[in-house]
Amino acid sequence: MSGVAKPTDHVFRVEVSPPGAQAPAPWYSQNVVAKDGTARVALPLALNDAPGKWTVLVREVATGVIGRATASVAP
């Protein structure tokens, strides 16, 4: 099919912040390479991590485009 762009590799910075934190937790922050437009990130939280809403920020390194989401961690 002509005229359809094929996904390329991208590098993303993933930063995870616990509830109420002013800065991301460096032990959960990582760089991720998306191959052919697909990437997976594992966040193995510790049993004693704070419950509540955690923030996940993903920034595409080349363009600076940012996506943000929250995830709830139960006690």
Image (cartoon, helix red, strand yellow):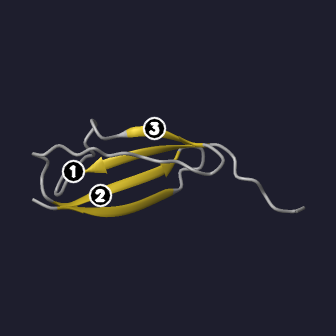
Which secondary structure lies at badge 2?
A: strand
Residue at (21% x, 50% y) in the render: 22
Relative image position of residue 8 (x, y in whole percent) = 69, 47
- Rounded to the nearest angstrom, the CA distance separating label 3 from label 1 is 20 Å
Return the disc, 2 or 3, that comes first in the chain's sequence.
Answer: 3
Amino acid beneath label 1: Gln
* Contact? badges 2 and 3 (CB < 8 Å): no
- Rounded to the nearest angstrom, the CA distance separating label 2 from label 1 is 11 Å
Q: Nearer the viewer, residue 66 or 34?
A: 34
| Residue for badge 2 | 55
Amino acid beneath label 2: Thr
Relative image position of residue 12 (x, y in whole percent) = 50, 45
Vertically, is 4 above or below 44? below
| Residue for badge 1 | 22
* Contact? badges 3 and 1 (CB < 8 Å): no
- Rounded to the nearest angstrom, the CA distance separating label 2 from label 3 is 16 Å
Disc number lying in front (3 or 1): 3
Q: Quadrant of the N terminus?
A: bottom right
Return the disc, 2 or 1, that comes first in the chain's sequence.
Answer: 1
Residue at (44% x, 52% y) in the render: 58
Return the disc, 3 or 1, that comes first in the chain's sequence.
Answer: 1
Which secondary structure lies at badge 3?
A: strand
Disc number lying in front (2 or 1): 2
Relative image position of residue 50 (x, y in whole percent) = 12, 52
Amino acid beneath label 3: Asn
Q: Residues within 10 Å of mark 1 (few under 14, many from 20)?
A: few
Residue at (39% x, 38% y) in the render: 30
Vertically, is 66 above or below 13? below
Q: Nearer the viewer, residue 44 or 23?
A: 44
Relative image position of residue 29 (x, y in whole percent) = 34, 40
